[in-house]
Amino acid sequence: MATGASLLPVRARAQTPMNVLVLIADDMRADLMGVAGNKLVRTPNLDRLARAGLYFPDAFVTTSVCPTSRASIMLGEYASRHKNIDFGTPLAANQWETSYHGRLKAQGYRTGYIGKWGLGGPLPSGFDVFDGFAGPGKYIEAGRKHLTAHLADRALEFITDQRDPYCLTVGFWAPHAEPGPDPAPAEERFRALYRDADLTPARTFSGTYNDDLPDSLKEAHSASLFADQLATPERYRAFLAGYLGLITGMDDAIGRILSAVDLDNTLVIFLSDNGFFLGEHGLPGKWLAFEESIRIPLIVKAPGVTGVSNELALNIDVAPTIYGALGLRHRRDGHDLLRNRRDHFFYEYALATFGAAGIRTRDKKFVIMPEHEFEMAFDLKADPFEQNNLAQENPDWVALLREKVVARYGDTLLAD
C-alpha cells in the first residue's frame, strides 16, 4: 500500500480536533473522473483532490442500492448487520448514536447533514444542522438555484458560520436520474460541454451480452425506471450529456466547498453510494453485481497522506477511517482505509427482486441469486467486461468461492 509511511501525520493531528467532511455522490460510477483515466468527463476539482490525497481506484460498495449503501457508509457495517435493506427503513435511534455522526457529536463535534438522506423517514433529529430530504430530489425548482449549487451554498454556510470542530456530510443528488422527459437536467453551462461530444455507447451496450441473464432480471425494477434512457441512440446520447453535465456541476460545487475548508486540519472523504449502468450488458440502473454497478469513486484527503492505493476499499470503510484519524475505536465490519488490508469482500442484496449474495476477490467474482436460480462467475483478469459467465463450467475456483458464500449466508441472503 502506498501510505504506510504517511500515517503518523494524521495520528499526530488527532490530538487537535480535526474537522470531518464527507461528500457523497449518488449513482456515480468509478470511471467518470479524469483521475480515473477518463478523457471526456471534466472533473478538475476531484482530480485535484485525488492528487493531493489518497485515491482508491479499486473501491466498491457491498450493496449497490442507495439506502442500504448509505447506512453502510454511516455505520461501517454490512447490510447483514445493520438490516437497513429497503427504501423505507430509517436508522434506529441506537444506530444514529453509533453512526459516525452520532459518535462525533458525543465527542463534542458540531454535526451537519445537507442534501439527500436516502434512509426514509422520519428524518433524523440528532444533528445540530439538518437540511436534507428523505428520498428523491428535484434538480430544478422555481425560485431556487439548481439543486447541486444550492447544496453547495448550504454547505458553505455551515462551514463558515460555526466553530471547529465540525462533522459535515453533503449528500448530493447528482448525478442520479429523475423521472420525466429530461432525466438528467444539468445546468446548461455544464450540459453544453458534452452535447457535441463523441458519446459512444458502451462496449456491451447491445448484442448478446445479457442473453444468459434470466428474463426476470432483465425486466425487473431497473428496466421500468431507467430503460427509456437507452431506448434509442439519440436518447442515450442526450441522457449521457446530461448525466456527465451533472457530474461536472457537482465537481464545480465541490470545488466551491473545498475553497472554504482548512485542508490542513480536515479529513475529506469523497465517494458515491453505488455505481451505475450506462447500457453495459444491455442494462440500465444499478442493483446487479456487475463491475459498473458496484465500483465507486473514492478519495481520502487527510493531512500528510498522499498517493494511490491498490488495496480493495469499500463503502463500509468510511466510518472506520474517520474513527482511525481521530483516535477512536471501531470493532465492526469495515477497515481504516489508511491501514487497509483485504483480499476479498462480500456482496449482498436482500431485496427479492435482485436478491443476491456473492464474493469478489482481486481478480475473481462469484454471485448467487436464489430467487432467480441463477449464478454468475467471472475471471476478471481474463474477462474484465464480464462477458463470459463461468458458473456452469465450474472450475475449481468457482467451487471454492461458492463454498465461501454458502458458508457465510447459508440458505438465506443475509446472515443472522
Image: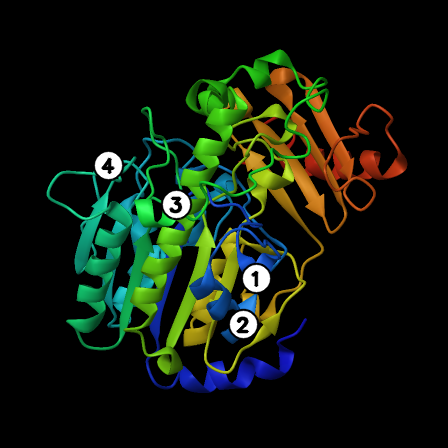
- Which residue in the protein does label 4 denote? 121
Q: In screen coordinates, is 208 left or right of 334?
A: right
Instruction: Give the amino acid at mark 4.
Output: Gly
Residues under labels 3 and 2: Cα distance? 27 Å
Q: Which mark is residue 311?
A: none
Dot 3 or dot 1, earlier in sequence = 1
Label 2 and label 1: CA atoms lie apart by 8 Å
State the CA–CA distance, disc 3 to disc 1: 22 Å
Mark 1, residue position:
35
Decide: marks 2, 1 in contact (CB < 8 A)? yes
- The amino acid sitting under disc 2 is Arg
Q: Disc 3 designates what residue? A: 192
Q: Earlier in the sequence, mark 1 or mark 4?
A: 1
Disc 4 packing (10 Å; few <14; some 14–19; many ≥20): some
Badge 3 marks a residue whose secondary structure is: loop
In the picture, measured across the screen, residue 105 lies left or right of residue 235, that is left
Q: Nearer the viewer, residue 389 or 320?
A: 389
